[in-house]
Amino acid sequence: MEGKDYCNIRELISLSKPRPSQGKTPKKTITGADVSCFMTSGEVLLLKDNVTALQTDVLNMKLMLHAAEKIRSDQMKTFTNSLQVIKCDLLECKQFMSNCLNNFNLSVNDLKLTLQPLE
């Protein structure tokens, strides 16, 4: 078919139905040359400034998120330590109360023995 007129084939190609794609459709990327065709240099600079500002904002948000996570982690450690101290205090209080009760019972038994009439 070399050297032949391709007009007939071109018509057939343009009239044919497109086949459904088998996978994902590729995304069209815009190069710097494509952008410059549609935008003035001032618009391109403004767009670059906006992108830089957005990147800065995202970085600042990530830093703030990291700082907040560190503060939360420190607060959780403090809270956990406080709970451990309270638990130890409660256990000591329970032991003290148990000792007091035992001493009271011993004292009552001693009193009973002392106050019991001799037979």
Image (tube, rainbow, N blue to C red):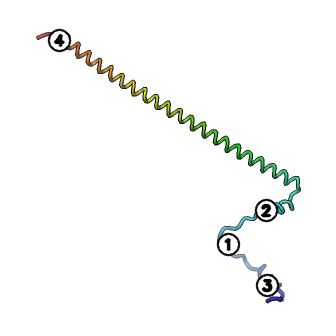
Element class at badge 2: loop
Element class at badge 1: loop
* Mark sitting earlier along the chain (2/3): 3
Element class at badge 3: helix
Q: What kind of residue is marked 4?
A: Gln
Residue 115 relative to residue 103: left or right: left
Q: Position of residue 70 (x, y in %)?
A: 60, 39
Q: Indicate which disc residue 9 carries.
A: 3
- Mark 4 or mark 2: which is in front? 2
Q: Position of residue 28 (x, y in %)?
A: 75, 65
Q: From mark 4 to mark 1, how far is it between C-alphas?
A: 105 Å
The residue at which mark 2 appears reads as: 30
Q: Position of residue 33 (x, y in %)?
A: 84, 62
Q: What kind of residue is marked 1?
A: Ser
- Mark 2 or mark 3: which is in front? 2
* Mark sitting earlier along the chain (1/3): 3
Asked if the residue under mark 2 is in contact with the one under mark 1, i.e. CB atoms within 8 Å, the reply is: no
